Image: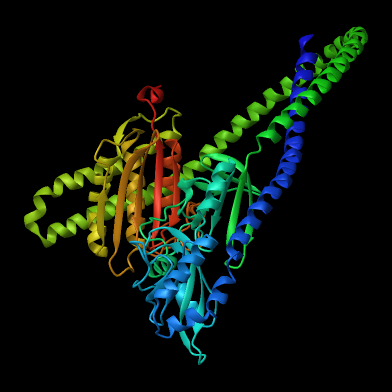
Amino acid sequence: MRLIPFLISAVVTLAVAAGVFRVSSAYFRSEEVSQAEGPLSLYQSSVVAELERFSHLTHVLARDAAVIDAASGKDTGALNLRLEDFAAKAGLDAIYLMDMSGVAIAASNFREPGSFVGQNYAFRPYFQQPLRGEQGRFYAIGATTGLPGYFIADAVRGRDGALAGVIAIKIGFQPLERSWNSSGEQVLLANEDGVVLLASDPGWRYRVLAPLSEDQRQRIKAARQFPGQALAPLEWQAGEGPRAVISGREQIHLTAKIPPHGWTLHYFASDGRAVARSWLVTSLVGFAAGLALILFQVQRARRISAALARSEREEAQLRRANEMLASEIEDRRTAERRLKRTQDELERASRLAALGRLAASVTHELGQPIAAMKNHLVAAEIAPDNSAALPARIGALVDRMEGITRQLKFFATPDAEAQTAVDLNAAMRASAALVAPNLEEAGAELRLDLCPGPVSVQGSRLRIEQVMTNLLRNAIDASEESAAPLIVAHTGTAGGEVWFDIQDNGHGLGAATLADLQEPFVTTRESGRGMGLGLAISAGIVQDHGGTMTARNREAGGAVFRVVFPVRPAEEDQP
């Protein structure tokens, strides 16, 4: 008992520590997010600066006399040397001039094997945009060199003011990407389609942040933007708030927009320092709280010791009160014995009332075999050659009627009916044979989709067949108005249970529930075609076997009645 206060102290201390860790973790992580905005801003500025550093150059070159003359059809030899010098001094990958058909007629790399001269770039958006009066801007993998770059282009107009060609530059971002990689931080730049253009981790490049639509893939293919790249998804998942999981690690995740293309810069930062600081604060607060709670529990234990002395005096008073209660308890037990005798009398009265209901049930159940006998006799009169099997069929029906009337013994003796192993497959086949005349009369088809293995349950074979016969007849009646009446019966086992169901394509349950249909003398058939006892009797039989019955409407029309029995060892049912 003395350990209990200390255990309480430990539990409370842990609860306080957990709360402190949660609050401090949220606070320190918010600080880490604020601090991460600084590097993100620097990365954003460096990307924007790189994009805009040479944005004016194509505008200037488009007005250069040598460029205008070459675009107008004059010799390009001098222009090649001029562009070569410009590109070398500016640190550009290439500068090149295209005619109105998109063919490069002069280029700074005219000496190199992979020269742009003679190549047609009319498919590139950066060539098409200047022809519409815009400055062309586009990021892609080079169609000639296979090296990625950022292209900027402007229209060249002749001395008469007419369009004569397009001058373009190619900027390589390899130095910028190498600086990201050497910084040790995780950062990537994705375009408006979510394709990663630059990344501190080379393995992220040309992967997509979200699956591309078919239209996006077709547009990228038409522009030959990323030839030879599968554009597979990146292993990442955005979380709640400024959080994301990338490469299997949850980290701080911040983004910034890059004009003018709507690109997005993603910056990932570890929150390990915030976690460490949270644990430190939690340890200090937890130690202080634990110490305070221990002191409190020591004081509380002293107060409890003083209270125990008072409780001993009160205990003597309670013993005297208990003696008085014992006398009252004896009086109550006498009243309970009188109540038990009254309940026994009510039970006998209930059994007499049930006898009346059983009489109506027997009348209903005997109607099915009698109707079947009439059908067999009529069939024998119509086809005398098939009358050889008539005695056997009539005998089986007589046995069935004898079994039904034998159930009256339950009101003469409380002994339970003998339980045997009943195969639901065999019982379903027997029930199907019993309703065969009804199927023929209604023009209905019955399909048996039975479990290939044994489906056994401890119970009364006759009573289980009663349930199946009632449900089959109900299904036949319900599907009479269908163009092609179809009834399907299934059996099966699952999870320590056996079951069967019967489906039809009739009018369904409508607005009625299974509870409504189980009420005695409630029927959906016209007058003279049923007493409304089939489901009520079947529900009682299923309940006696410890099973359950359910019913529902089918989406395709009709209804499904399903009966489930628990699988019990044979010895449990023996007296």
**How many labels sit on residues?**
0
Q: Is residue 532 visible?
A: no
Q: Which residue is found at the position 43% from the left and 34% from the top? A: 410
Q: Quadrant of residue 412?
A: top left
Q: Which residue is found at the position 73% from the left and 31% from the top? A: 277
Q: Position of residue 60 (x, y in %)?
A: 57, 76
Q: Quadrant of residue 488?
A: bottom left
**Vertical arrangement, residue 258 with respect to residue 337, above or below:** below
Q: Position of residue 259 (x, y in %)?
A: 62, 65
297 with respect to 101 (left or right): right
**Vertical arrangement, residue 569 with respect to residue 153, above or below:** above
Between residue 105 and residue 537, name the one nearer to us: 105
157 with respect to 256 (left or right): left
Q: Quadrant of the N terminus?
A: top right
Q: Position of residue 395 (x, y in %)?
A: 20, 43
Q: Which residue is found at the position 51% from the left and 81% from the top? A: 65
Q: Position of residue 196 (x, y in %)?
A: 50, 55
Q: Quadrant of the C terminus?
A: top left
300 with respect to 45 (left or right): right
**Vertical arrangement, residue 402 with respect to residue 101, above or below:** above
Between residue 529 and residue 201, name the one nearer to us: 201
